Image: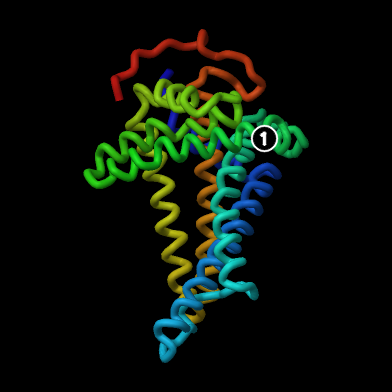
Amino acid sequence: MTLSIGRTLGNGLQRSLSLSGLVVFLLTAVSQLLLVGATNTLLADLVRRWLPAASLSTTGFTLPVSTTVAALLGVVLILFGTFVFIIGTRLFTRDQRSLSTIPRGVFTHRIGRAFLSGLAVSVIITPFITAGMLLLVPGLFLAVSFQFAIFAVGVEDAGPITACRRSWRLARGNRWRLLGLVAVFTALAIVASSVAALLSVVSPVAGQIASVVALSGTVVVLYAMLADAFLQLSGETPDGRSTSGTATTTADPL
């Protein structure tokens, strides 16, 4: 099946502008604000130890906790990011009419297994994508090939290896279009960062907060667009009905 970019962008925006989108945004923004605060706390401690004469005004906002607590909190929040992504896959792949509801099952259905599988997927694909980015093209190829792996984990209860294979099959023939989605997200992120940079001139703290909030919003839009792309390429409607028999196309290898 060939991915429709127009439908993906339109439906993705609609999905993000829903109660489900708001929940994912709040989870993302709050966790990222805490992560930035924890990181700043650690950086501020390093500055005080090694550069006592330096100003701390450029480190941004910090948390009123010890460095040990900040370090532990940072690790927990990084892991929590996987949980948020899994929740996002489940919320955004539902029917449009269901996006205004938040069923408990989204947060509880085999969540432990899904969380561990999501972590395993990250451990498997991150080294390959990172190494590929040294040559750019291989990294982009792998990134678009595996970007549905967490969706397979969250929506289809797939294990890590099965999820990676599933994502590879879904991306086949549509990698250029998926790369286009990544380009749209990158453009949105650049715009958001530029606006935040203007606030940083006035106040580093305000700039950091604005940057995190804006980037969290773009991440939610990306999750929603990928959710619609996942539904299209898997040949199913959000209510689980197959659409694979409604159209046939011959896709190129990428």
Q: Residue at x 70, y 35 (%)?
A: 106
Residue 180, relative to residue 207: is it above or below? above
Residue 49 x, y percent position in the rendering: 45, 82
Q: Nearer the viewer, residue 137 or 184?
A: 137
Residue 90 x, y percent position in the rendering: 63, 33
Identify the colour scheme used: rainbow
Residue 213 x, y percent position in the rendering: 56, 61
Q: Residues within 10 Å of mark 1 (few under 14, many from 20)?
A: some
Horizontally, residue 97 falls left or right of residue 252, namely right
Horizontally, residue 99 falls left or right of residue 153, namely right
Splitting the image into 4 quarters, where does residue 141 fall?
Answer: top left
Quadrant into which the C terminus falls: top left
Residue 189 x, y percent position in the rendering: 44, 55
Q: Amino acid at mark 1?
A: Ile
Splitting the image into 4 quarters, where does residue 140 fall?
Answer: top left
Task: List the single residue furthest toward the left.
Answer: 135
Q: Nearer the viewer, residue 252 or 123?
A: 123
Horizontally, residue 173 falls left or right of residue 56, namely left
Task: List the single residue furthest toward the top.
Answer: 245
Q: Is residue 3 visible?
A: no
Residue 232, relative to residue 222: is it above or below? above
Report which residue position mark 1 lands on: 111
- The mark tally for this picture is 1
Q: Is residue 1 visible?
A: yes
Horizontally, residue 12 falls left or right of residue 26, namely left
Q: What SS does tag 1 mark?
A: helix
Q: Nearer the viewer, residue 145 or 5?
A: 145
Q: Residue at x 41, y 32 (%)?
A: 146
Splitting the image into 4 quarters, where does residue 129 fall?
Answer: top left
Residue 222, relative to residue 247: is it above or below? below
Q: Residue at x 64, y 39 (%)?
A: 87
Quadrant into which the N terminus falls: top left
